[in-house]
Amino acid sequence: MLTYTLRRLAYLIPTLLGITFVTFIIISLAPGDPVALMQSGEMSARISPAAYNQMLKHYGLDKPVHVRYVIWLKRLITLDFGTSFLDDRQVIEKILERLPATLILNVTALLFALLLSIPLGLYSAVRQYSLFDKVNGVILYMLYSLPDFWVALILIMFLGVKLKLLPFFGIESMNAKEMGFFAYFWDRILHMVMPTFCLTYGSLAFLSRFVRGSTLEVIRKDYIRTARAKGLEEKAVLYKHVFKNTLIPILTLLGILLPTIISGSVILEYIFSWPGIGALFFGAVLSRDYPTVMGLSFITAVMVLLSTLVADLLYAWADPRITYD
């Protein structure tokens, strides 16, 4: 296991190099640049060609793409992602400032998805082809097919604007600092309701159907029939044998699911003005803020690769039959 872990960690280096190189090439070849964007609006009359060239040199955009990538890579060794083109702040500071908000939102959504999908999937499998299974399947497929950004806009329109039941802007109210502890805590929860729901329902539908399929597969195994033939109660068969072995495949999904939710929250954070890395990434792409885009891409790639590794290790821990040489 230790050898496998070290080997997988060693593979992270060339993988990250490939991901960052491709990302750097794509954003560098995209139309426009930060200085050109400055000239496209009201500032067009304020920037002369000489000033334009000077700004290109200041940001390092006058160098070839491969040279800029090597410079960025050298800085990466010391976790220096450079400074943002927008406000000249260190990119790492901006990421660390917004990362907690994203993690709180996405981890909460993932926990809700797991807590709801596992019992729904198990019960649907045990009551296969029942009315509950059919209705549950239809509802989940409908939820899975709905675009999260469309649902977010509908919720904002009805629950936020018309009915004024829930806040839909930011992570807290403008007067939150003046509230008491419990009022402030409740205010934060209310601000999380709509974005958390939009992040949860898609994962809930996917996970629930996955749990149902895994449970049906386990129920048909020979050792389940043997346990029933020995006279074990149905509850004992379900909890001691079916439930445990159903959860093992779910571990393989967790390594991919959390980074997927985080990447899916980019647009939702922008819609709800949630101060996380998703909104930061969306704004950085629109403004061609290359250092911020590269920093966030690197952080996301590391999270995906490490999450996949942890999922593999958890899978081996949960199932002793799995060994890594």
Image: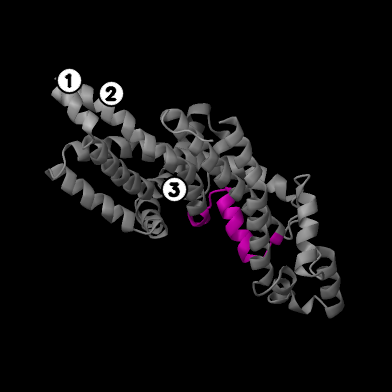
| Magenta highlight: main SS | helix
Closest to the observer: 177 or 192?
192
Q: Secondary structure at mark 2?
A: helix
Q: Earlier in the sequence, mark 2 or mark 1?
A: 1
Query: Residue drawn 71% across and 45% down?
Result: 93
Mark yes or no: residue 272 visible.
no
- The residue identified by callout 3 is 195
Relative to 65, residue 44 above or below: below
Say which of 172 and 212 sits in front: 212
Q: What amino acid is at disc 3? A: Pro
Alpha-carbon span between mark 1 and mark 3: 44 Å
Q: Which mark is on residue 174?
A: none
Q: Which residue is mark 2?
A: 240
Do callouts 2 and 3 mark residues in contact (Cβ within 8 Å)?
Answer: no
The magenta region covers 266-290
C-alpha gap between disc 2 and disc 1 = 10 Å
Q: Which residue is mark 1?
A: 232
